[in-house]
Amino acid sequence: MSNQELIQSSTRTLNPEISNTLNTLTKGQRIRVTLKLRVGSTATWMAPVEGIFRHFNFLSTGIATDRIPEDDIVVVCVHFTKDNGELSSFTVDDHTTIEKI
């Protein structure tokens, strides 16, 4: 995969492995996502969830202060449907793994 095909937000380029996975997913593909959850400053755990991929796009996060558009933080947001029918989404970070199953 060339650098031109890597998914980029305004803040940084995604891990090439995750970028490749997202670029090859098709609507309806079954996926397993593992996210690192954190509560407070010390408690963390890995949380896997499975579902059906719908699509991904970019989320421009809100900031509480008035800033210029170039300072916006944009992250990759993946949308999927859990096995119980719940529509869900998550933003991708350095601790996210996405697997086709």
Image (cartoon, grey):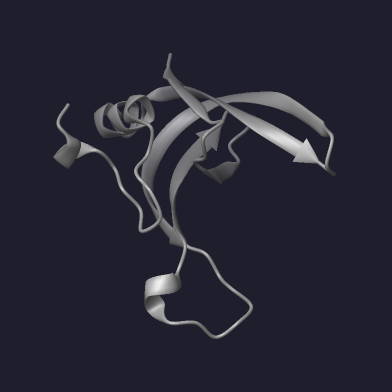
Q: Is residue 71 left or right of residue 5?
A: right
**Where the C terminus falls, by quadrant?**
top left
Q: Is residue 42 above or below residue 90?
A: above
Residue reaching furthest to the top: 101
Question: Which residue is rendered at x = 56% and y = 31% of the image?
Answer: 95
Q: Residue 1 location in percent, x, y?
A: 17, 26
Image position of 74 with respect to 1: above or below? below
Front position in the image: 56 or 60 = 60
Position of 66 relative to 61 (above/below): below
Q: Left or right? Give the position of 34 relative to 27.
A: right
Please give the count of numbered marks on the rendered protein: 0
Q: Could you say which is closer to the camera, residue 96 or residue 12?
A: 12
Is 61 in front, or is 65? Answer: 65
Q: Position of residue 85 (x, y in %)?
A: 58, 36
Location of residue 17 in the rendering, given as x and y in whole percent from the top left corner:
35, 24
Res. 62 image quadrant: bottom right
At horizontal 52% and vertical 35% (from top left) the residue drawn is 94
Q: Nearer the viewer, residue 11 or 5?
A: 11
Identify the residue at the far bottom of this view: 66
Image location of residue 63, percent across then percent down: 58, 73
Q: Identify the residue at image location x=36%, y=30%.
A: 28
